[in-house]
Image (tube, rainbow, N blue to C red):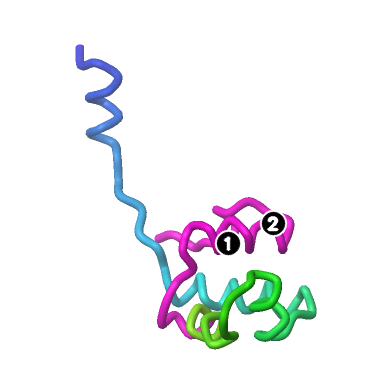
Amino acid sequence: MKGSKEVFAMNYRKAVLDKEATSIKLRSFRINANLTYEGLATLLQLNTPRVIYDWECAKKMPNIVNLYNLALIFNMKMEDLLVMR
């Protein structure tokens, strides 16, 4: 009988981020929170609101620190901000 680690490894499937769906989700959370690009950028202490725009257009994704802070701002878990496929 195979060990539990071997069975887990055999059943493991790498998660892949759906950037398009995640960007749509991030935009909807910002809008539902009545935040502008500028307002969210200020809360996150970003130099420019362009970063928020880039996230919402799937040009870039938030780093782990910004993802954590977005979860705090929107009062949810980090994984709830992401769409995996």
Q: Tell me the kind of residue under disc 2.
A: Leu
On the image, the x and y values in percent for residue 42 come to 69, 77
Query: Across the whole image, how many numbered discs are drawn on residues?
Result: 2
Q: Is residue 54 left or right of residue 9?
A: right
Q: Tell me the kind of residue under disc 1.
A: Leu
What range is drawn magenta here?
Answer: 56-85
Judge by depth and name the residue closer to the eye, 27 or 13. Answer: 27
On the image, the x and y values in percent for residue 68 come to 58, 56
Using the image, tell me which numbered label, if any, was put on residue 35. none
Quarter holding the C terminus?
A: bottom left
Above or below, 72 against 13 in this view is below
Q: Nearer the viewer's eye, disc 2 or disc 1?
A: 2
The residue singled out by tag 1 in the image is 81
Judge by depth and name the residue closer to the eye, 75 or 63. Answer: 63
On the image, the x and y values in percent for residue 39 come to 72, 81
Residue lying at 76% horizontally and 76% vertically, measured from the top left: 32
Using the image, tell me which numbered label, if any, was put on residue 72. 2
Binning the other alpha carbons within 10 Å of mark 1 as few (below 14), some (14 to 19) or many (20 upward) gives: some
| Element on which disc 1 rests | helix
Residue lying at 72% horizontally and 85% vertically, measured from the top left: 36
